[in-house]
Amino acid sequence: MPKKKFSPSGGAREEKRRFRWLLYQKPKAYPSRPISNKKDMLKPIRRS
């Protein structure tokens, strides 16, 4: 019983941690707007 109770608790905690990390890293790591800007800036640089 204790093992079963621990399993869901750990899973929920890990999921929450993962969700928080994804939310924290997504905006900082690669926001939607900076990505398009970077791509647009990289295209002209490569062309020239």
Image (cartoon, helix red, strand yellow):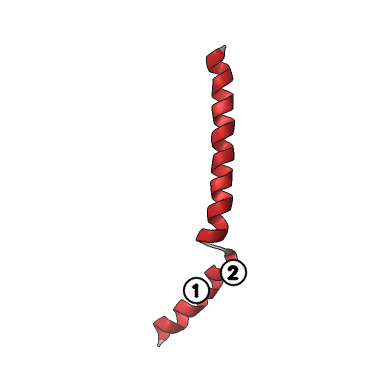
Image coords of residue 46 (percent x, y): 40, 81
The amino acid on which the numbered mark 1 sits, given as a three-letter code, is Lys
Image coords of residue 30 (percent x, y): 52, 62
Residue drawn at point x = 52 percent, y = 16 percent: 3
Q: Nearer the viewer, residue 39 or 3?
A: 3
Query: Relative to residue 45, is residue 20 drawn left or right?
Result: right
Image coords of residue 36 (percent x, y): 55, 71
The amino acid on which the numbered mark 2 sits, given as a three-letter code, is Arg
Task: Mark 2: give few (<14), some (14-19) or many (20+) Cα within 10 Å.
Answer: few
In the displayed structure, would residue 38 be above or below residue 5? below
Residue drawn at point x = 58 percent, y = 65 percent: 32
Quadrant housing residue 6: top right
Label annotation for residue 28:
none
Provide the secondary structure element on which disc 2 rests. helix
Residue drawn at point x = 54 percent, y = 74 percent: 37
* Location of the C terminus (image quadrant): bottom left
In the displayed structure, would residue 47 be above or below residue 20? below
Quadrant housing residue 15: top right
- Tell which circle, 1 or 2, labels the residue nearer the N-terminal end: 2
Provide the secondary structure element on which disc 1 rests. helix
Q: For mark 1, what is the residue?
A: 39
Image coords of residue 11 (percent x, y): 55, 30
Label annotation for residue 33:
2
Residue drawn at point x = 55 percent, y = 40 percent: 17
Task: Mark 1: give few (<14), some (14-19) or many (20+) Cα within 10 Å.
Answer: few
Inter-mark Cα distance, 1 to 2: 10 Å
